[in-house]
Image: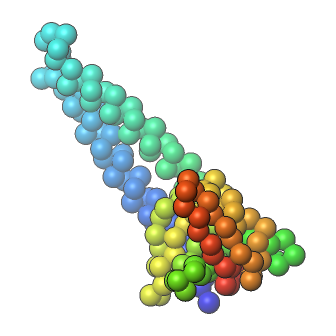
């Protein structure tokens, strides 16, 4: 069985790595924006301005990552209760029509982060994702239909932790 707390630690480590990269990029953009060689000499000389916009965007991204890390630090994934069905914190195995299995961890933020539990890949999804919304309240054995545009996907909930 997979350990949710170990998966949570992986998410936090990944977010911390991302934050370090974004903070470095923000520092570089800020240095570029404020460097004396990049003072605009005419209205077409926009390197400093562009770097300032980039630094602002990187600072916003850094703040979003800090908030995501805070959410994951406070997060206590509950044990699965079939009476409530799938909720935030569920670790679920889906199987599609081709018998392909995928493991998903329904987290508070960080959708798209890919984790490893032993040899098994686990994808973080959020309640805001179409599949995350479709999973809420489901139990083992339920079918999940996901319709995105003209594409219709069918999954079965195989296991939940």
User: Which image quadrant for residue 44?
Assistant: top left
Colouring style: rainbow
Residue drawn 67% across the image and 84% down it:
158
> Residue 91: horizontal and vertical position, in percent?
64, 76
Vertical side of 141 occupied by 48: above or below: above
Numbered label tally: 0
Residue drawn 23% across the image and 24% down it:
48
Residue drawn 55% across the image and 86% down it:
99
Front one among 126 and 96: 96
Q: Which quarter shows the N terminus?
A: bottom right
Q: Residue furthest right?
A: 83
> Residue 61: horizontal and vertical position, in percent?
44, 43
Front one among 143 and 101: 143
Vertical side of 38 occupied by 58: above or below: below
Vertical side of 107 occupied by 30: above or below: above
Residue drawn 46% across the image and 59% down it:
15
Q: Residue furthest top?
A: 42
User: Which image quadrant for residue 50?
Assistant: top left
Front one among 148 and 33: 148
């Amino acid at each position: 069985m997979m350990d949710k707390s170990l998966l949570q630690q992986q998410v936090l480590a990944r977010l911390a790595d991302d934050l370090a990269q974004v903070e470095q990029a923000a520092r570089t953009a800020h240095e570029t924006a404020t460097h004396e060689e990049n003072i605009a000499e005419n209205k077409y000389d926009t390197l400093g301005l562009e770097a300032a916009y980039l630094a602002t965007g990187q600072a916003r991204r850094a703040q979003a990552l800090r908030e995501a890390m805070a959410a994951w630090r406070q997060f206590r994934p509950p044990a699965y209760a079939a009476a409530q069905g799938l909720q935030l914190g569920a670790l679920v195995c889906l199987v599609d029509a081709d018998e392909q299995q995928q493991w998903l961890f329904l987290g508070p933020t960080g959708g798209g982060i890919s984790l490893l539990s032993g040899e098994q890949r686990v994808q973080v999804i959020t309640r805001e994702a179409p599949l995350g919304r479709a999973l809420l309240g489901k139990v083992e054995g339920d079918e999940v239909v996901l319709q995105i545009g003209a594409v219709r996907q069918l999954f079965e909930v195989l296991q939940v932790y």
